[in-house]
Amino acid sequence: MAIDLTNKPIAITGAGSGIGRATALACAGAGMPVALSGRREEPLRAVAAEIERAGGRAVVVPGDVTSPTDCARLIERCVERFGSVYSVFANAGYGQEAPAHEMTDDDIRAMFETNFFGTLNTIRPAVPHMLRARAGHILVCSSCVAKFALPFFSVYSATKAAQNHLSRGMNLELRPHGVSVSSVHPVGTRTEFFDTAMRRSASGRLIKHTPDAFFQSPERVARAIVRCLRRPRPEVWTSLSVRLGMSLGMLLPGLSDRALRRMVDQRLREGEGAGPTAHAPPHPEGASA
Ligand SMILES: NC(=O)c1ccc[n+]([C@@H]2O[C@H](COP(=O)([O-])OP(=O)(O)OC[C@H]3O[C@@H](n4cnc5c(N)ncnc54)[C@H](OP(=O)(O)O)[C@@H]3O)[C@@H](O)[C@H]2O)c1
C-alpha cells in the first residue's frame, strides 16, 4: 500500500534551485512540511513563500553541507518546527568538467566534500530520529553517471558512484529498522547545474552539444522522488531507456567504453588545437533522457 505523506516532514539540501526546489514544491504538494537548506538564503525564502502561498508549511535553514554543524542545525530546526523528521533529501552537489589528471587535489577534495561527505553530513543527524521512530526515508541525489565512468567528468562520476554505493549499503543496513534509503539517478536536467559547472571548469568552455530537447525538467525528477517516497525502492530512475542502457553498459563494459571512446575521438577532432577541456564529449547528464 502506498505511504500517506501527509504531515511527514522532509529536510532538503540545495532546495533553492533545480531538482531540490522542484522536489520541495512537489513534497509540499503531497502534504509534507519542508525544511529548506542551501547556502544562499534568498532563493530558499522564495521557495518557502511559494509553498506557503499554496497552503503548505516550510522553514528556511540556510547552511553549507560541508559543515556538520550546519547539517545538524537543519535537522534540529526541522524537528523543532514540525515535530519530527520523516525524510531527508541529500541533494546539494555540483560538477566540474576537466580531465582527472589536470584537476588539483584541492578541487577533487572539494567536490567529494560537497557531493559525498555533504551527503553523509546531511544524513547522519537524521538517522537517530528515524531509528527511534522506526520509520523514515533517506534520499540521495546521485546521477545516471554513477553507473559508468565518463571522460572529462571522471571525478564527478566517482562522487556520484560513491553516493550510489553509500545509499545501497545503508538501505540494507537500515531497512530492518524501518528506514528506507534510495539513490536518485537523474539524466540531464534543466537546472543551474550547468552554469555552475561552466564557472568551475578550467577553460570555462563546458561543451553542451546535446540539444535542449534531450533535457528533462526538474519537475519530472521531483515527481519520481515523490513516487519513491510513497512506494520506497533502492533506486529512482527518471528514464527507462537510460536505465536499460546503463544496465547493458555494466554487463558489457567494453561495449560502453567503445561508445564513449567514439565520443571522445569526435571531440578531439573537433577541438584540434584547443585546450584539453575543449575536448570534452557532450555533457554526460545531457547525453540522453
Ligand atoms: N542537472 C543535472 O543534469 C543533474 C543530473 C544528475 C544529477 N544531478 C545532481 O542533482 C543535484 C542537484 O543539482 P541541480 O541539477 O538541481 O543543480 P543546481 O540547481 O545547481 O542545484 C544545486 C544546489 O546545491 C546547492 N549547493 C551546492 N553546494 C552546496 C553546499 N556546499 N552546501 C549547501 N548547498 C549547496 C546549491 O545552492 P547554494 O549555491 O545556494 O548553496 C543549489 O541549490 C546535484 O547533486 C547534482 O549532482 C544533476
Image: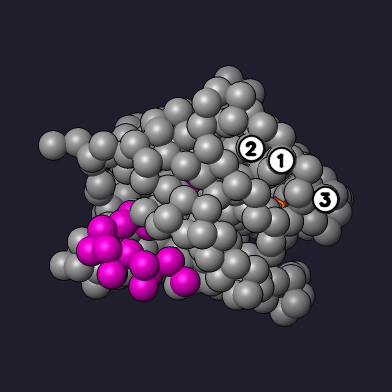
Foreground label between 1 and 3: 1
Task: Check disc 1 and report the residue beneath it.
Answer: 45
Mark 1 neighbour density, 10 Å: few (under 14) some (14–19) many (20 or more): some
Q: CA distance from mark 1 to mark 3?
A: 25 Å
Label 3 is placed on what type of residue?
Answer: Arg
Pinpoint residue 34: horizontal percent, then vertical percent: 51, 44
Tell me the CA gap for discs 3 and 2. Answer: 27 Å
Ligand 1 within 8 A of label 1's CB?
A: no
Looking at the rendered structure, the secondary structure element under dot 2 is helix
Task: Give the residue at mark 3.
Answer: 199
Q: Earlier in the sequence, mark 3 or mark 2?
A: 2
Q: Name the residue beneath numbered marker 2.
A: 48
Give the left or right position of residue 139, taking residue 43 as reference: left
Which x, y percent locates residue 246? 36, 46
User: Which three-letter amino acid code belongs to the residue tagged 2?
Assistant: Ala
Q: Is mark 2 within 8 Å of ligand 1?
A: no
Q: What's the amino acid at mark 1? A: Arg
* Location of residue 10 in the rendering, given as x and y in whole percent from the top left corner: 45, 49
Which region of the structure is painted magenta? 125-145
Quarter residue 178 falls in = bottom left
Assign a secondary structure to mark 1. Answer: helix
* Foreground of the two, 31 or 253: 31
Q: Are marks 2 and 1 in contact (CB under 8 Å)?
A: yes
